Image: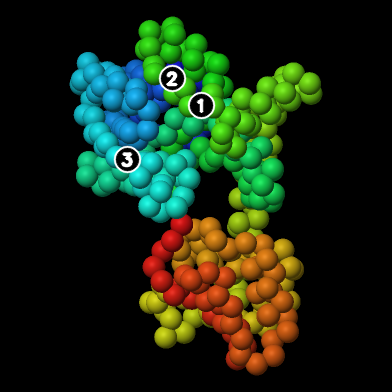
Amino acid sequence: MFENKVLNTIKKYNMISEQDKIVVAVSGGPDSMALLNTLINLKVKINFNLCVAHVNHMIRKVADEETEYVKEFCHKHGIECYVKKIDVLSIANIEKISTEEAGRNVRYAFFEEIFSKVKANKIAIAHNANDNAETVLMNVIRGTGTLGLKGIEPVRKNKYIRPLIEMERQDIEQYCEDCNLNPKFDESNKENVYTRNKIRNILIPFIKREFNPNIVEGLNRLSNLATQENRYIEKIVEKNLGEIAISTNENENDNSKIILDLKKFNVLDEFIKGKIILLCVSKLFESTKGVEKKHIEDVIRLCNNNIGNKYLTPNKHLKIFVGKGRIIISRLQEKWG
């Protein structure tokens, strides 16, 4: 039943095709082990290849045991397993970021490394319905706007796939028990230090108990609706961008800047203006991280005033020049995010 539901999710979002080469991110926990075991069993229904990428963060004493567990499981099933052992705490201190962010950066960099090495075309991540619900709630608390209601996308960039995104954590743990997988549980998930853990261990159980026992299902439904609405809005924004973008011989093959017609931009709705600026930044950097609502408002205000030549630098990577009937959004340094 569990594997059939995962297969339905895979088909629903067209995640896997025949002959795909998939890198599976495996920590050794219930989610990733359920994902790996399910994909192994589904290979008889869809002809694809897979390998495993595992990162040992060197944070907990049991990390080495988890690594050995993953390696042994892969060996037993004849699956190629790539392992990276790296001191995430040191990286967090050096880069002055949280261990959570440092760990994520290290993991995804390693997944991309193995992706290129084995010439894969998909990376499978074990995010589930509970993870998505937690992400939506976290974004609501942070005030990220309607875009944050999308939560975790089932498929991103036609590369990252999440076959367990419609499965709830309790079903995943039951599947692990039924299949005698004996996954390794990360005890740090019980520590209410990080925001996500507080939402997982305190907020959602409280909402379940006091307001809505089906809150995870409800938040995932909200996420799906927000995703559909954002896709529609994105089409409108792309169309508007196409109508106001200026193509010149100078910038035809230049991917370091985007030039817009100032007059045409100014007559657009304020909401669309903001979305166009974010889309331009995303096209230049593949990220909008570091560009906040106040920056968007400043740019729109500058365009509306249009007195002389003015520019803004929301961060050290980005420059937005307004003058001579144009808006020039340009990259000062290489990609960030």
Q: CA distance from mark 3 to mark 2?
A: 20 Å
Residue at the disc numbered 3: 87
**Residue under the point 43% across and 61% down:** 336
Q: In the image, residue 261 lies at what x, y percent? A: 61, 81
Going by the numbered disc 3, the residue's amino acid type is Asp
Going by the numbered disc 2, the residue's amino acid type is Phe
**Quarter of the image where one finds residue 290:** bottom right
Residue at the disc numbered 2: 185
Q: CA distance from mark 2 to mark 1?
A: 8 Å
Q: In the image, residue 309 lies at what x, y percent? A: 61, 90
* Mark 3: secondary structure: loop
Q: CA distance from mark 3 to mark 1?
A: 19 Å
Contact flag, marks 3 and 2 (Cβ < 8 Å)? no
For the residue pair 49 and 115, the one nearer the viewer reads as: 115
* 265 sits to left or right of 181: right
Residue lying farthest to the right in this orientation: 211
Contact flag, marks 2 and 1 (Cβ < 8 Å)? yes
Number of other residues with Cα within 10 Å of mark 2, as a class: few under 14, some 14 to 19, many 20 or more? some
Q: In the image, residue 185 lies at what x, y percent? A: 43, 19
Q: Is residue 132 visible?
A: no
Number of other residues with Cα within 10 Å of mark 3, as a class: few under 14, some 14 to 19, many 20 or more? some
**Residue under the point 45% across and 52% down:** 96
In the image, is residue 235 above or below residue 177? below
For the residue pair 45 and 88, the one nearer the viewer reads as: 88
Q: In the image, residue 281 lies at what x, y percent? A: 52, 66
Going by the numbered disc 1, the residue's amino acid type is Asn
Residue at the disc numbered 1: 189
